[in-house]
Image: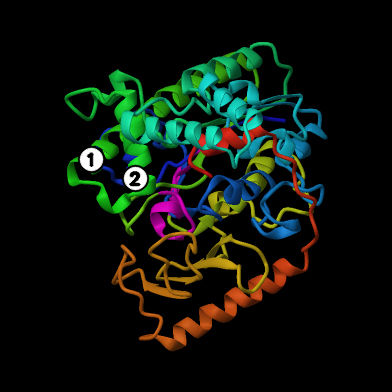
Amino acid sequence: MKNVLLVTVDSLRADHVGYHGYDRDTTPNLDRRAESAHVFSNAFSNGCSTRRSFPSILSSTYPLMHGGFERITEDRTLISEALAEQGYETGGFQSNPFLLAEFGYGRGYDHYFGSNAEASSTSKLRQFVKQSFDEDGAAFQLLKSAFDFSERALGYNPGESSVPADVKTDKALEWVSDVSEPAFLWVHYMDVHHPYHPPAEHQLEFRDSVVSKRESVKLRRKMLEAPDEITDGELQTILDIYDGEVRFFDEQMDRLIRETRASLSGETVVAITSDHGDEFNDHHGFAHYDTFYDELLHVPLVIDADGSGRYDELVSLLDLAPTLLDYAGVDVPETFVGDSLVSLVEHGDWNKDAVIAESGTLADEEFRCAYRTDSWKYIRGGDHKRADAKPEEELYDLVEDPEERENVVEAVPGRASEFRDAVLAHKRTLEETDRSVAEVAIDDETQQRLEDLGYK
């Protein structure tokens, strides 16, 4: 059986990757690896954020199956569990609070790194304030205002709520150096997630001066709270430091793959992808909310195993886990709903003509979904939390309007009706697996880490 290395990165949109045609040298190592690997140029996430995307990546199920994306229930089988059952030694290294073991993501791992021990002293100070003062009292409100002001006006560090790429790579390689084979390693890098503050040398790849941490924090706060006030100069700075983060990830991803393969004696299959992208005022906002446009859904996907090739067929991250199990020679669990890409790679067989992304819940008034073909995208329900709330339905002709600017849902009613029916049929399939799920008790420290990352 082959070793398996799954590398994921938070918030990397496909059009900021070199082999996708980006005009900046953000991913020289990934581009080089892509030349001798299988590259899926039309790969799409099944959700617009980490919580919504990772059920598909790691369990090959849609976000709203089996009780939803709030946590991974026992009805889902993780790729780590499938491999562990076949004798694999398994390690997971991540630092996104939504991927904690408490949400079910630690199942099947011999070693799972991703705990609240990573929260900064600032985050812990915030937590202390919440625990020690009445939230309705004047003291609490004063201290909370001071924290908010320090971020917005002064650029004070809001807390390192994730582990930098070089440190995470070190931890993963330490585990690999003493592992038994066959082995499965999953590493999720958070560096491309805002606030963007890459090392100075990676900033200087794309700009003449280094942006301070203080300034990057202030920009993060502004782009989340007042996106309409971001100036052209600030937007360029945001793009510069985002691209610097991508370059930092690319460097550490390459080191991880090189040294992992050097440490393991057997053949190692490698997959590299992102959970979703980030918006840079493409549709009047920043970061990643449930807008379902391609800047969020289109992701890079490279699989280095048995040859090379480029494929334009529509695939989604649902198809990643069954592909890796196929290459590893391990049976695919019955709960998986994605298809192995090996059939496409080896025989040219692929019968999917649409990908689906989801959010919300299965309640009619909360269900949000995108249905994308090669030529069209239909969106049911935009992100209701945004001030510029979108219509209940959107339809885009991707051939004539690849940037998704003109909603033609009323101009092309027949096409809209076709996709509306397809989405409702998909919803009925989701409802077949619906179940009540007990809420996960989130401690104050995790709540604070989520807030530091802009999720609250």
Residue 6: x and y in percent read 59, 34
From the top left corner, tell me how far across and down residue 109 is, in percent: 75, 29
Q: How many marks?
A: 2
Residue 238 in sight:
yes
* Residue visible at 77% across and 54% down in the picture: 335
**Callout 2 amino acid:** Met
Inspect the magenta stretch and tell me whether residue 80 lies in it.
no
Residue drawn 34% across the image and 29% down it: 155
Q: Secondary structure at mark 2?
A: helix
**Mark 1 / mark 2, whichever is N-terminal:** 2
Looking at the picture, tell me which residue is in the foreground, 39 or 239.
239
> Where residue 108 appears, x then y in whole percent?
77, 33
Q: Is residue 212 rendered to the left or right of residue 287? A: left
The reply to whether discs 1 and 2 touch (Cβ–Cβ < 8 Å) is: yes
User: Which quadrant would residue 360 be assigned to in this image?
Assistant: bottom right
| Segment colored magenta | 287-311
Residue linked to disc 2: 223
**Residue 177, labelled with which disc?**
none
